[in-house]
């Protein structure tokens, strides 16, 4: 019997992860915006402002793929939307039955966590009054300025915890892979521990230090740090995995001065760029000064190359310093740099390959933190 393939517009995608938050099922989808039509729900909650324009962030992605002017013109016809107001429109060529536009801002076009939570609560109440039982919520981090996905995920989870009882299912949608990773860390913590403070994170100005455990090969980031020697060690496993492109770049860049850093394309790596930090001699940490100098040089490169998220694994093997001393040295150097410079770096993922390395990073983050505050400070449009 001949099988016919399902039409791509009629298929669904599997969730990246599934959680139970306060007794309700929450599915997380991390996908490109061109696959928005493959997720179905009674309504999609979209962040907006009083103008209802869909010209940036997730709003623009939705507009561009759900019908261009068809969607935006209907939305703009509802403007001006008052602070914390909700507007209902069609969802264009998606499988959502409706769009719920929630104004996150006050009259001065600024927002804060309590405003965001209240706007989401208002949207959930409107959905409940109409008998809608399944809702999707778009990651609105891209719609804000100087916002971080960890904080957005926390705020959305709080709104879900206070939902009307008639809503039985939530689907959270991220169109940025790094933001999706951050959502997984926060939602996993809340599902297991509730709303206890999350000790693996610390925000310094506009940058999040986020300690995590995992394999660097599978963690999304815009740049990967590699602690190496002045000759950039072309036999390193990172270089081998990067393939011919990365090997050629390493040979072209070497040697660099001890305490300096260089950047290259990532080749076949999941991370598009690699920053090579010359801090080793003979496979061992050369000195604390060399590490500090290389870290500062790497941060400057990440800023100038606009690498919004950098992945910092513990060197393997780590010799010359304990994991705790190395983590503290790197974290304190990053903290000093961030307090001196207004950088484009949004996130530093401090990655341990095992429990001991993760605890070392987490201890370094905790040492920096006087008091962790979630959600974040006021965010402007």
Image: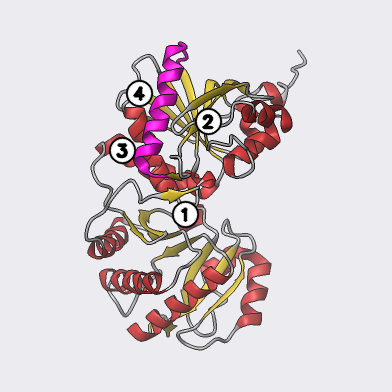
Task: Give the Cα distance between marks 3 and 2.
Answer: 32 Å
User: Quarter holding the N terminus?
Assistant: top right
Q: State which mark lies toward you, 2 or 1.
A: 2
Q: Determine which residue is flagged by label 4.
A: 163
Quarter of the rendering containing residue 191: top left
Q: What residue appears at the point 36 percent right and 31 percent down from the top-left corner?
A: 159
Q: Determine which residue is flagged by label 1.
A: 146
**Magenta region:** 111-133
Residue 289 is covered by the magenta coloring: no
**Front-lying residue, 340 or 65:** 340
Specify whether 118 is left or right of 146: left
Q: Determine which residue is flagged by label 2.
A: 81
Q: Determine which residue is flagged by label 3.
A: 190
Q: What residue appears at the point 53 percent right and 69 percent down from the top-left corner?
A: 303
Q: What residue appears at the point 27 percent right and 73 percent down from the top-left corner?
A: 325
Q: Disc 3, disc 2: CB below 8 Å?
A: no
């Amino acid at each position: 019997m001949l099988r016919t393939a399902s039409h791509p517009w009629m298929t669904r995608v599997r969730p990246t992860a599934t959680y139970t938050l306060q007794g309700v099922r929450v599915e997380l989808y991390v996908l490109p915006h061109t696959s928005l039509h493959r997720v179905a729900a009674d309504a999609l909650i979209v962040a907006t402002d009083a103008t209802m324009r869909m010209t940036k962030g997730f709003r623009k992605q939705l507009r561009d793929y759900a019908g261009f002017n068809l969607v935006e013109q209907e939305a703009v016809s509802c403007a001006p939307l008052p602070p914390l107001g909700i507007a209902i429109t069609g969802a264009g060529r998606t499988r959502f039955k409706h769009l719920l536009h929630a104004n996150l801002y006050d009259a001065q076009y600024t927002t804060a966590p309590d405003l965001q939570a209240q706007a989401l609560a208002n949207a959930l109440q409107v959905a409940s009054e109409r008998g809608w039982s399944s809702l999707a919520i778009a990651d609105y981090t891209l719609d804000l300025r100087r916002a971080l996905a960890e904080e957005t995920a926390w705020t959305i989870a709080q709104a879900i915890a206070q939902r009307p009882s008639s809503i039985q299912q939530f689907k959270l949608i991220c169109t940025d892979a790094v933001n999706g990773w951050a959502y997984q860390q926060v939602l996993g913590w809340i599902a297991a521990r509730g709303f206890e403070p999350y000790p693996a994170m610390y925000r310094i100005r506009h940058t999040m230090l986020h300690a995590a455990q995992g394999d660097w090969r599978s963690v999304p980031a815009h740049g990967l740090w590699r602690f190496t020697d002045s000759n950039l060690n072309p036999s390193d496993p990172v270089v081998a995995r990067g393939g011919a492109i990365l090997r050629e770049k390493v040979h072209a860049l070497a040697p660099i001065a001890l305490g300096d850093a260089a950047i290259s394309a990532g080749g076949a790596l999941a991370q598009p760029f690699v920053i090579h930090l010359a801090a080793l001699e003979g496979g061992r940490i050369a000195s604390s000064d060399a590490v500090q100098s290389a870290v500062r040089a790497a941060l400057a490169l990440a800023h100038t190359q606009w690498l919004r998220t950098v992945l910092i694994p513990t060197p393997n093997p780590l010799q010359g310093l304990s994991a705790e001393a190395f983590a503290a040295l790197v974290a304190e150097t990053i903290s000093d740099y961030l307090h001196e410079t207004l950088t484009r770096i949004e996130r530093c993922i401090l990655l341990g390959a095992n429990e001991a390395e993760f605890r070392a990073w987490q201890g370094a983050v905790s040492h920096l933190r006087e008091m962790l505050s979630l959600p974040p400070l006021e965010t402007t449009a």
